[in-house]
Amino acid sequence: MNIALIVYLIFLIFIAARSARHVKDIPDFFVARKGASAKAVAGSLVATILGGSAVIGAIDSGARLGGAATWFMLVGALGLLALIPFAGRAYQHGKYALPDLVESLYGKGPRLVASLVIPVAWTGIVAAQIIAAAKLLMTFTALSYTAAAIVAAAVFTGYTLAGGQLSILRTDFLQACLIVLGLVVLAGFALFGGNPANAAPSLSAILQGAPAFPFNTNFSPLDLFLLILTYGTTYTAGPDIFSRMFCAKDTATAKKAIFTAAAILVPVAFVIGFLAVYGVGLGDVQGAHITAIANAVLPQPLIPLIALALLSVVLSSADTTLLSSSVIICRLFDVSNEKEIPACAGMTMKNARMTMKDAGMTPEQVQGKLESANNRPLTKARVVILLNGIVALLLALVFTDIIGTLLLALAVYAGAFTVPILWGLLGLKAKPKFVAVAIVAGGVLALAGKLCPALPGSLGSHTGDILMIAAFVVNGIVLAVGREHLSKQV
């Protein structure tokens, strides 16, 4: 088991080292020079979406939700499909990260708000992935929590800062294949009898007592509506999704990748829902239900496959989230701002010679100028990633259970940014100060909705739900008022 993990981690580092040789400038590092194929982007989308909360968290929710756990990924697929009509305009207006898109739609004020809010939330999400990775490593190895957290953080931070987006696209495709293969193999053994030597519970007995799909007493149509608002919309207007899309070589490639990823998520959703139901029959288990299922139904030689798949689940989300957050921080402090980069940066030697011919520079001087211009912002970007990874690691070492915070961050992000982003992509306008107010108001209401305790009475028990819905409604109203104000001025 330990050998398989070591080989896997070394292989990831090898991919990063190879990718680093092809990173010449900021466009390479942040968006793979916008040259990624549909296969690469789709693989990265799938790997990023099938993160710790999506897979491990959904399967752990089986005792409460039963088959309704299927909705987590179905809603994700729905969110991706909803993005396709907006993909062309988003690709046209976006550059490196979501705040770039916000600035293109509304100006620098709303961009500043997005640049301050998103990295804070996303660093917490990176920390949550480190926690999940550490607990998985503890399950399959003899490492302590601290050592496992350091190993996990060092690996994905290392290959992210080495090769940037090029590393992530290559490792994500491998990890997406491992995740889907691992889930299908695990579900297959559970469905067709598992390992008789482990005395796994019978399938019929499990299905009889589990909450049903699509709805049950613990998951109503209202819960589905709220899940779409707070979770599904992050697949339509989330920074990680846009960061994948901005790597595509053109709009058609981006749309094809988004559709492919959504198509893959639909069957995976039912596999996850089935495993969530199956895990209920195992009773009280220590650690994640998915590892308990693996130990119950799989032959021993296949356990390393599930271990690698689960580690991929976590690392594939952590690297994308880390880079997304770091790119936003870099752009906030103008680390990758074009005004810092001489005109020769990013050019080929041929174009650079033509540009500098009048200056009387030799080819060697041009080469040195190119390397200096490109290396300076790259070094700063890598330092930001390193520092961001260290902060996330420290959070993971102090707080060992922040999955709830992860879901809280997603809900607050959805309440703050979904409506303004989709509003702008629809071609609607609003004054920047109204956009900033809408973001803040939506985020505050969403936060209140997640933190507010249930109040007395039938309506009071839904106070949190009402506040969550109000976040989107108020967001839209403020933008509409800002649009009317703008039209009156014009």
Image: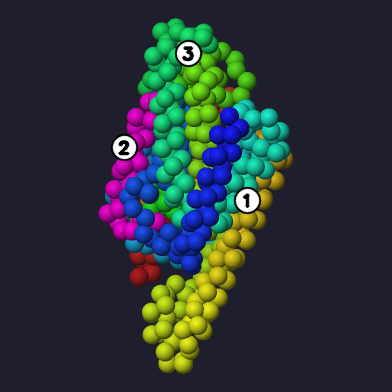
Q: Nearer the viewer, residue 363 or 123?
A: 363
- Give the amino acid at mark 3: Asn
Q: x, y percentage for residue 206?
A: 45, 10
Mark earlier in primary sequence (3, 1)? 3
- Where is the N terminus found, in terms of image quarters? top right
Q: x, y percentage for residue 112?
A: 54, 62
Residue 219 found in image quarter = top left
**Residue 389's disc number:** 1
Tell me the SS state at disc 2.
helix
Q: x, y percentage for residue 305?
A: 49, 30
Please name the residue shown 41% across and 8% down the image: 204
**Residue 192's disc number:** none
Name above or below for residue 295 compared with residue 35.
above
Tell me the SS state at disc 1.
helix
Magenta span: chief secondary structure: helix
Residue 428 found in image quarter = bottom left
Q: From which residue to which does the magenta span run?
A: 246-271
Q: Nearer the viewer, residue 106 or 53?
A: 53
Q: Report the residue marked by disc 3.
A: 195
Name above or below for residue 30 compared with residue 460.
below
Q: Would residue 262 be counted in the magenta stretch?
A: yes
Q: Nearer the viewer, residue 352 or 234?
A: 352
Please name the residue shown 52% across and 71% down the image: 374
Q: Report the residue marked by disc 2.
A: 263
Name above or below for residue 459 compared with residue 400.
above
Is residue 76 left or right of 281 when viewed as pictured?
left
Tell me the SS state at disc 3.
loop
Is residue 440 left or right of 43 when viewed as pictured?
right
Q: Counting other residues with Cα less than 10 Å from the Cα at mark 3, is it few (<14), some (14-19), or many (20 or more)? A: some
Q: Is residue 443 visible?
A: no
- Give the amino acid at mark 2: Ala
Q: Residue furthest left?
A: 252
